[in-house]
Amino acid sequence: MLIISRSKSRRGRVPCRCPRGFKGRYTVVRGDTMYFIAKRYGIRLQSLIKANPHITNPNLIYPGDILCVPSCKKRKRCKEPEE
């Protein structure tokens, strides 16, 4: 018998700590993907994935998950998220 827990989507996964130099934290909302969050902040997808080891499968994020958003290395490419 296969049991799928939905508790992750209710409480959200929270990192123990964010890496040095991180820009801030982001709370995942319905419809978000790691790709679109990275694009919104002007960072590389791989950088976002690497900054969030508590997300074991970056293809599966849930509303309420907390992500660490790393700072951009190249200032020209950084941008504030569009609301």
Image (cartoon, rainbow, N blue to C red):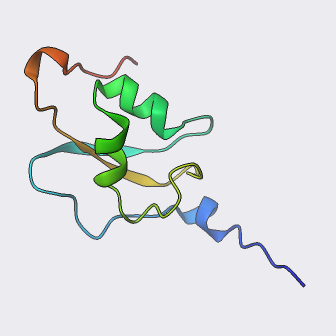
In this view, which residue lies farthest toward the bottom?
1
Location of residue 33 in the rendering, given as x and y in whole percent from the top left corner:
53, 37
Question: Could you say which quadrant of the image residue 29 lies in?
Answer: top right
Where is residue 3, by image quadrant?
A: bottom right
Q: Is residue 23 left or right of residue 35?
A: left
Above or below 54: residue 40:
above
Name the residue: 37% across, 37% down.
45
How many numbered discs? 0
User: Residue 6's spot in the image, x, y percent?
Assistant: 70, 67
In depth, the one of 30 and 42 nearer the eye is 42
Q: Is residue 51 above or below residue 71?
A: below
Q: Quadrant of the N terminus?
A: bottom right
**Does residue 14 appear left or right of residue 33 in this picture?**
left
Q: Position of residue 73 (x, y in %)?
A: 11, 32
Does residue 13 sit above or below 27 in this rendering?
Answer: below
Q: Position of residue 41 (x, y in %)?
A: 31, 27
Query: Residue placed farthest to the right in the image?
Result: 1
Residue shown at 77% from the left, 72% from the top? 4
Specify the quadrant that holds the C terminus.
top left
Q: Is residue 42 left or right of residue 33?
A: left
Look at the picture and state if 65 lies above or below 69.
Answer: below
In percent of the image, x 37 and y 32: which residue is there?
Answer: 38
Residue at 32% x, 22% y is 81
